[in-house]
């Protein structure tokens, strides 16, 4: 089982979008049973809430399920559970480092690190920009590139 955790600030916009897109990609490729995919936020402001209305709207337009998703806060134990902890921006990486446990073999990276010639280094937060379509565009590219990388490295 390959365990992938997506991280953003509050776990209602970018990371649940990435979780939903990544799950959809693995389902389309018939490899969903080889993955455990989740998302979490740095902060606890939205714990227990569903994805943001803007995230739900863009996922509905693309016919991508987010059923059952509820925001949660990242915890130290996530480093023992997940092989990949994928953040949406540099600030998330910095915040993760402050709570990171010293665990070997956990890849911590930004989603855009996997995209060749990415137009952005960080995925802008649509909670503030209100541009959920652009966020979807970036997250979708990142998830596809991440899945390709994992398949190549893990022989999936």
Image (cartoon, helix red, strand yellow):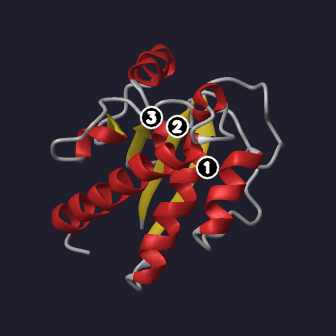
What residue does disc 2 label? 7
What separation in Å lies between label 2 and label 3 (alpha carbons)? 6 Å
Which sits in the foreground, 101 or 151? 151
On the image, the x and y values in percent for residue 45 come to 78, 25
Which sits in the foreground, 54 or 89? 54
Image quadrant in which you'd find residue 56: bottom right
Question: Which residue shows up at 47% across the image and 37% down it?
Answer: 79
Image quadrant in which you'd find residue 30: bottom left
Q: Residues within 10 Å of mark 1 (few under 14, many from 20)?
A: many
Question: Which residue shows up at 56% across the image and 29% down it?
Answer: 76
In this rendering, the label closer to the viewer, 2 or 3: 3
What residue does disc 1 label? 16
What residue does disc 3 label? 88
Pointer 2 or 3: first along the chain: 2
What separation in Å lies between label 2 and label 1 (alpha carbons)? 8 Å
Q: Which mark is residue 91?
A: none
Q: Residue furthest bottom?
A: 30
Question: Which residue shows up at 51% across the image and 52% down it?
Answer: 18
Quadrant location, the C terminus: bottom left
Tag 2 near tag 1, CB within 8 Å: no
Which sits in the foreground, 24 or 124? 124
């Amino acid at each position: 089982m390959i365990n992938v955790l997506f991280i953003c600030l509050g776990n209602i916009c970018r990371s649940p979008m990435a979780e939903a897109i990544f799950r959809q990609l693995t389902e389309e490729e018939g490899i969903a049973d080889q993955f455990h995919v989740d998302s979490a936020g740095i902060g606890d402001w939205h714990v227990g809430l569903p994805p943001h209305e803007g995230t739900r709207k863009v996922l509905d337009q693309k016919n991508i399920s987010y059923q059952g998703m509820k925001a949660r806060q990242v915890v130290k134990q996530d480093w023992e559970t997940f092989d990949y902890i994928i953040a949406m921006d540099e600030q998330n990486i910095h915040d993760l480092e402050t709570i990171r446990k010293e665990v070997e073999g956990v890849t911590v990276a930004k989603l855009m690190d996997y995209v060749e010639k990415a137009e952005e280094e960080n995925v802008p937060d649509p909670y503030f920009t209100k541009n959920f379509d652009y966020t979807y565009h970036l997250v979708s590219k990142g998830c596809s590139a991440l899945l390709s990388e994992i398949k190549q490295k893990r022989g999936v």
